[in-house]
Image (spheres, grey):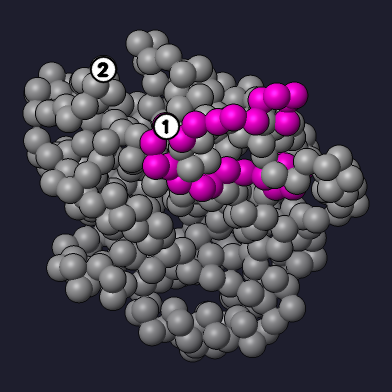
Amino acid sequence: MIPFSPPRIDQRVIDEVTAALQSGWITTGPRTKQFEQNISEYCGCKTTVAVNSWTMGMQVLLKWWGIQEGDEVILPAYTYCASANVIIHSGATPVMVDINTTDFNISIEAIKKAITPKTKAIIAVDIAGFPCDYDLLNKLVSDPEIQAQFSARNEIQKMLNRILVISDAAHSFGASVNGVRSGSLTDISAFSFHAVKNLTTAEGGALCFNLPSEFDHAEIYKTFCTMILHGQNKDALAKTQKGNWRYDVEEPGFKCNMTDLQAAIGLVELERYQENLDRRKEIFELYDLGFSTSNWALTPLYKTENKISSFHLYQLRIEDITEQQRDTIMQEIFDRDVSVNVHFLPLPILTAYKKRGYKMADYPETWNKYHNEISLPVYFNLSNEQVETVIQSVIQSVNKILKL
């Protein structure tokens, strides 16, 4: 069976995790701090806070920004449920909008129509690792007419004096726009380092801050390190200093710090990340070539004149099929011992959001992209022979089910 996206766990990773275990530091410690610094250097952002998951990092971020009941946060209807769940848990209302016709990312025009005086943040999702239109989005929130609608609730919001732009960069570590890497493309970016991501720490994530110069990023880092450790103003590393046991809890916080065991994996992953990106790009190009003679194949956009993807997901679409046909084709591919997936079930078709009044009919382009999409395996250790097996399995399955 060709798996969908296994992590790259080899002897280098095992040795580094073993070294972390033997060091005595298995929770947040020197490896976590080094990992944060290396991410900041790689992404070009002003500071980075490592967390135990994208979800909890985003939850803390929304709390810090002051998102609460009565607020609205705009996001695409085409995303994983985590993007919306954190908004619900903050007490605010998710305002879903449709996506572009050219790619899977949020439509800037749809965002513009959805902005109200209640809008406090926009979460743009880099689906499959292809960056959103951040140049246009950053320009939009700074438009005088849009900015005039913004009503700040607290001192942090007053300092920015506009809608906060958050990049849901769970898929896009290593992607770039105009040579600027994901993590530095807008105000704040949130990465995921889950097991199936390009760069993994088993579970984990990071918040990368790139706010205007008025913000003290060293103070932001200190604030978030406190917030992610129950509001405690000293972590375990600081408390080991002689006589430094006493601490305070400044505000009721969260518990979502990254551990050194996780960071140990991430340090290895980041050090060799370019070879990972290079291999994933090769696989994308092999898929493009393999489906080039199939007139039913709609291959994904992953590179333009100014954007390049992180090659996280290869989202193949099959023209003129129904959702049921797509599911039948997928089962046929599975029966040929190839694992595939769908990214994602749109938010409005999930029970949690249907019962909150969201309707799939309101997002036609999201449905257009979803109902015929199949994600193919992409990972560093996938061989060229296995790629060819995937291609032939897909082609044969489509031909069989559609009787071509």
What is the count of numbered marks? 2
Residue 54: x and y in percent read 50, 48
- Label 1 sits on a secondary structure element that is loop
**Quarter of the figure that contains the N terminus:** bottom right
Taking the view exactly as shown, the residue that stands out farthest to the top is: 213
Residue ID at (28%, 75%)? 351
Q: Is residue 383 visible?
A: yes
Q: Can residue 278 be seen here?
A: no
Residue at image coords 22%, 63%: 364
Few, some or many residues within 10 Å of mark 1 (<14, 14–19, 20+): few
| Horizontal and vertical percent position of residue 181 | 54, 28
The amino acid beneath tag 1 is: Glu
Within-10-Å neighbours for mark 2: few <14, some 14–19, many 20+? few
- Which residue is disc 1 drawn over? 250
Q: Which residue is mark 2?
A: 159
Q: Position of residue 105 (x, y in %)?
A: 36, 47
Q: Is residue 104 above or below residue 278?
A: below
| Sooner in the amino-acid sequence: mark 2 or mark 1 | 2
Q: Name the amino acid, label 2.
A: Met
User: Is the stretch drawn in magenta largely helix, strand or loop?
Assistant: loop
Q: Nearer the viewer, residue 122 or 403?
A: 122
